[in-house]
Image (cartoon, rainbow, N blue to C red):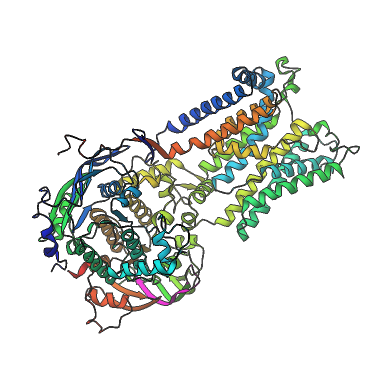
Amino acid sequence: MSLPFTLRLEARLEVSRWLSPALTAGALVVALVVSGLILMVVGADPVRVYLHIVGSSLGSIGAISDTLVKSTPLILTGLACALAFRMRLWNIGAEGQLLLGAWAASAVVLVPLVPAGAPGPIVLAAMLVAGFLGGALWGLIPGVLRAKFGVNEIIATLMLNSIAFAWIQYWVFGPWTEGGFQMSRQFPVEAWLPRLSDLAAAVPAFRGLTVHAGFLLALLAAVVVWFIVERSSWGYEIRLIGDNPRAARYAGIRIARNILLVFAISGGLAGIAGMAEIAGVVHRLQDNFSPGYGYTAIIVAYLAKFHPLRVVPVAILFGALILAGREIQPSGVPAMIQGIILFCLIASEVFLRYRVSVVRPLPVAGAAPGTEP
Amino acid sequence: MRETPSGIEIPRVSGQTPTAVATQAPAVELRGIVKRFPGVVANDGVDFTLAAGEVHALLGENGAGKSTLVNILDGLYQPDAGEILIEGRPVAFRSPRDAIAAGIGMVHQHFTLVASMTVTENVLIGLDRPRFRLDERRYEAEIGRLAEAHGLRVDPSAKVWQLSVGERQRVEILKVLYRGARVLIMDEPTAVLAPQEIDDLFRTLRSMTEGGRSIVFISHKLGEVLSIADRVTVMRRGKVTAKGLPAAGMTKPDLAQLMVGREVLESLERTWLPPGAVVLSLENVEADGDRGVQVLRGVNLQVRSGEIVGIAAVAGNGQSELAEVISGLRPCHGRIMVGGEDIANLPVRKSIQRGVAHVPEDRTGVGTAPNLSLVDNLIMKRYRSRPIGHGWTIDMGAARAAASELKDSYEISAPSIETQARLLSGGNIQRLILAREIESEPRLMIAVQPTRGLDVGAVEAAHRLLMERRTAGAAILLISEDLDEILTLSDRVAVLYEGRVVGIMDAVDTDVNRIGLLMTGGEIGDTAAEPVAGPGAR
């Protein structure tokens, strides 16, 4: 009656080098197949849908440029999460830190903190510093709570996201509103991050390309975070605390101080994402300018296995999916695909730690000749 | 000499030759067991026969394949080839549940108890019965009777967190007995016990074999193996090197040679050193334990340069906390002078800078970061200083060079220096920790249980390393529950009982009985009480 064999999971003692990338690729294939089946059930042609997604996000120079624009805040917030997650600090608050970074950068222009008419580089540098500080201070709140009082950082960061959202609403509806609309006035050109299209006069091929200097900033940040985590003594402390806090304490590492530092840098990175988005894309502070980058960042960091350099390609993939979301009806399809990809990737983790073995029960007594040694 | 009445039970086995299956089938027979893991053959055609009513010791170095073999017998692993016969019938276990249904139960080295529940509840966990309502009185009485029948002194209504380590082990044994086990696998059962508790355990084991049960006894302590086992099977590198030899008439050197494959020098060279300067001086040190109860109650102790002071104590008498207090991991009152400076309550970093090295008791929980590489684990104490640390960066080239040097000179066996620490065997993890701590050339070294669970070869290596440090002039505080080890290595022995030093003596003119009594709170001159069956008592 029963199957002639059973499947069993056995712990892997060693993990070969190629296994992790192979599993990721396998999980992506499975995710696309599953998504395709669902698309077929609702009556769509999955191949056409996929081709359309690829076409609308990567099909032309313009589309690629738009994808990179979308991926810029994802890289920065993804790095914010990856850095914190390395230390097993579950900073779910990149969204709030992004909003506060955007707010602080806006303040530079709208208060104004830098005199109106100051040259572009000075305005942008001030906005960058303000964006970093805004996010860092917002990140330090849960950092202090965690380091000094042991408050769970997941709850604290999540709640602070709602507060940050309300804070932005107050400013765009109130003090900074333009004619009662939920947005500030447009920033002067000095506060715009340069775009490729700004060079169209010299290079005609750049006409209409929206990708802005924030993308370079994000790539630079990825390299810096990689260097911190992999090459600095501070990064070593982060990795040690993340893997075994008791061993870190035994090695003489101050854990509370590191919690504060990591939260500040993580928040600061998310803050730069906010600054880059308003200075590079929307050019004003407005309601709902982030479609939840800070939340998608959690997925990005997870899929990159908290590795700073891998955050970049993963963020670009998710940028492409967000962009495709505008092209596909119903617009929930890319979100569904995102969800299925994440689900498959997380599920595939099991196979990193375990291998499946086929167990055949030994024949019952009497049925096994030749068992004498 | 031999305390085990092996002559009484042995007739149940047909003669002493294990291969001859006589009228009664053996309790367990393993034939040609093969188990492969990636890169190693953990069991390579292993035969093992457990006769009914015997204590059968399974000996071998770490990585010899003992654990794999008993895990196969317990249903945790499935063999790649080979047969398991229980009382002559072939079986295939898919899980420990199948094994216990066939009467085979394992008493693990690391206990699997729920601390907040009572003894009775722990014994009943996972059973189908009682189904809904727990008639606690009835089961308590039942478990109490079972415990009494086997001389397992433990209160069935006590919460597990209130129990001593020895009592917890009795609960583990009760769990297995209650499930009707006929065969008990004991994985290093004496590792955590005091001499008197070992004596109790051995009495229990004998009462069980007299009732017809059989016991697989895994241990590294050769003296114990000789005093409790009827027969001995020795494994080396996945193969059986001695199958079911009668223990009677064997000696420790015989066993050691079978295990290691060469002669083991048991005695260590001890050079006389003139007493050096006082390096560590504890003055009236008091500290609380994790539960907020005071566990150190005014400890006064000095350790000099070139001296090993051994701390003998039963688990839970403050010795673990003493090590933590000195290395700065636990707050305390009193003064801890290292080289003339009070380091009490200073950050851990300060004590590292003052030259305090610490071989922690919990090797995987404190001593290493399991998912980080060998390199990362080896530079833990010196990533801040040159040549590895340069300001705020780490020179990974220098770190790797240092790590491969340590890997070679301390013979840490691992595929590469990038291997994760969790993939190392217990002996190699300890080599890693010793390498790291010794390489810092400490003036004071605190070694807690430096050889627990290690095989003969690794113990020998660790002892030699500690002696070398002593000769080099380090002060060494050795905290161990292995009295043999303390007596072998120490210049002086301090006995800790309930957070106080109750006796300090020169190691040369001390006998185990006296230490054993002090360890358990007995008065000196009380020696007429119980005979102490410590490892050194033979």
Is residue B131 visible in the rendered image? The answer is yes
Residue A301 in the image: state x and y as whole percent: 58, 38
Q: Residue furthest bottom?
A: B525
Residue B103 in the image: state x and y as whole percent: 28, 53
Q: What residue do we see at 39% from left, 34% from top?
A: A16
Magenta stretch, main secondary structure class:
strand
Position of B308 compared to A274: left or right?
left
Residue B290 in the image: state x and y as whole percent: 48, 67
Question: Looking at the picture, does residue B383 appear above or below residue A208?
Answer: below
Residue A316 placement: quadrant: top right
Residue A315 placement: quadrant: top right
Q: What residue do we see at 12% from left, 50% from top?
A: B18
Residue B441 in the image: state x and y as whole percent: 37, 58
Q: Is residue A320 magenta?
A: no
Position of A39 compared to A206: left or right?
left
Is residue B340 visible in the rendered image? The answer is no
Q: Residue furthest right?
A: A179
Q: Is residue B291 magenta?
A: yes
Query: Residue B453 or B436: which is nearer the viewer?
Result: B453
Q: Which range of residues does the magenta coloring cover? A: B288-304
Question: Looking at the picture, does residue A219 appear above or below residue B506?
Answer: above
Q: What residue do we see at 58% from left, 43% from top?
A: A83
Query: Residue B125 or B380: which is nearer the viewer?
Result: B125
> The C terminus of chain B appears in which quarter of the rendering?
bottom left
Position of A342 compared to A67: left or right?
left
